[in-house]
Image: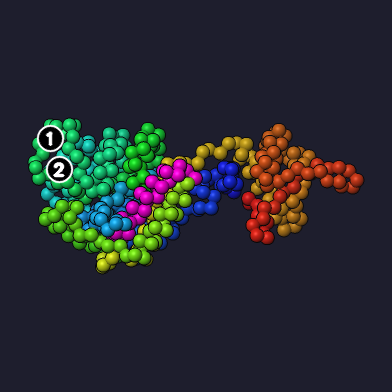
Amino acid sequence: MNTLPYNDGRGLVPQSMSHLPKDCYPLTIEQAVKALPPTMWQAVKECCAIHGAGSNAALANIFGPASFAAASNFCIGDQHGQPMSLNLNICCIAAPLGGKSKAHRRFMAPVVEVMGRWQKRWLFGNVTLAALLRKIRDGGTLAMLSMAEARGYLRSPLSHSFPDLSDLYDGNVPSFDRADDKEDIGEDAPDSAVFVVCINVQNDAYRDWLDKHGKEAIASGYLFRLLMMETDELANEGAQQPESALLDYDRRIGELVTSGQERLETMSASELPVIEVSADAERILRQGQRQFEHMASAALSSRLATVFAVRLAANARRIAGCMHVFEGYKDAVLADTMDRAVTIAEFFGAQWLATVFPPKPVPDDIQRAQRLLDYLHELARSPWIPQTSWRKADIVGKAPNFKWTPAQMHDAIRLICGWGFAEIVTRVENGRRVVKLELRPYLAGNRPLYLG
């Protein structure tokens, strides 16, 4: 069956993409993965081929460790040249057997190995906000919230502590308040930290979380900072073959995390070296931000669409910085790297919109009308006797073939005529007046277009 349409006053829009404007189509996971720089792309492809992870899960889970490693070494200049953390907050929402655990374990393995030498608590799961902040203020300025299954986390207060999560996303340690009165915090407690979030969760748990906290998450601004994707992709068994690209990934992650440990022992996260962004890369990012705002215009108000675009552009900048550092590029971020980052961010952005504003269930009468329209277009494209006009009574008479009542067939005819894809006309045939149903072509240039 073709995608079902709805009319939003500007014309017919595919129901399955009603979170996007009618002239905006989401990128595929293949396009997003292809946009990765060479080393990261090869690692993702090998993780899928050998370990059986889905492409969506692999893409999301490689950016957790990549962000952790890059953010411990560098910041990136914002549009004004001021330091911006390379922290990313990522959520992969997948059905059971989607390969998220496989991807998470494999990409986190070298981080866990190297961080074994770090003296402070660094890896967090379903922890209280007070405990998390206490560990960071105690010197754990290189930290990560990372889970293969975050169901418990989403039920915890930390998951909706939005002001504190936003502070940590920006690399700032939240201010001390009266909730922390019992803590013994020294005067040298850090005011900045590397804190990366990369969680995986099943669809039902995330839907419950959005139902409970989505409105507050949007109002607080935190949800706009979150990169998310939702997929029903299934993992596969993988293939028994030696790793190559993944070993290169392990070595590079190990180098960066070791270097990050050394830097954060002598300086704060806010004092890390700043990567500059070239003028051409800034131009590409500005173009991307305009596209992001347009992409959100069907689902969000004008003001919130602007917020969405600004936050997504900031994430694109961070993604570009992470890829720049991971690949070992020198000097400023170039246009090619930013173009790749904008593509990946656009993919995440469309996923965000589809997750936060999922299409509504299609009513039965709309589905029947779509089925009838598909059937009529099959007749119109017949290689033997193509037809675009039928007696209305003959179409109604076919109702039992569809397991419909005549009233349901009448209603389906009414809807496709109301959509403008067909019309009821009176013709004279053999001297008799006949009521007919006729398909109406829609013109794009000189080409007739139908929904089919």
Left-right relation of 424 to 108? right
Which segment is the magenta one? 298-326
Q: What residue type is labelled 2?
A: Arg
Look at the image and say whether residue 249 sits in the magenta stretch. no
Q: Residue at x 61, y 39 (%)?
A: 366
Q: What element carries label 1?
A: loop
* Mark 2 crowd level (few <14, some 14–19, many ≥20, 10 Å Cα): many
Q: Name the residue that disc number 2 marks.
A: 137
Q: Which residue is drawn at 41% across and 43% down?
A: 304
Q: Distance between the residues labelled 2 and 1?
A: 10 Å
Q: Which residue is drawn at 22% across and 46% down?
A: 172
Q: Do the residues labelled 2 and 1 touch (CB within 8 Å)?
A: yes
Q: Give the answer, above or below, for where 176 lies relative to 422.
A: above
- Please state the horizontal and vertical placement of residue 43, each as a whole percent of the image: 32, 61
- Please state the horizontal and vertical placement of residue 283, each as a whole percent of the image: 38, 62
Q: Which amino acid does label 1 sit on?
A: Glu
The quadrant where residue 431 appears: top right
The number of discs equals 2
Q: Give the answer, above or below, for where 225 lies relative to 67.
A: above
The circle on residue 373 is none
The circle on residue 183 is 1
Residue 118 appears in the figure: yes
Secondary structure mainly formed by the magenta segment: helix
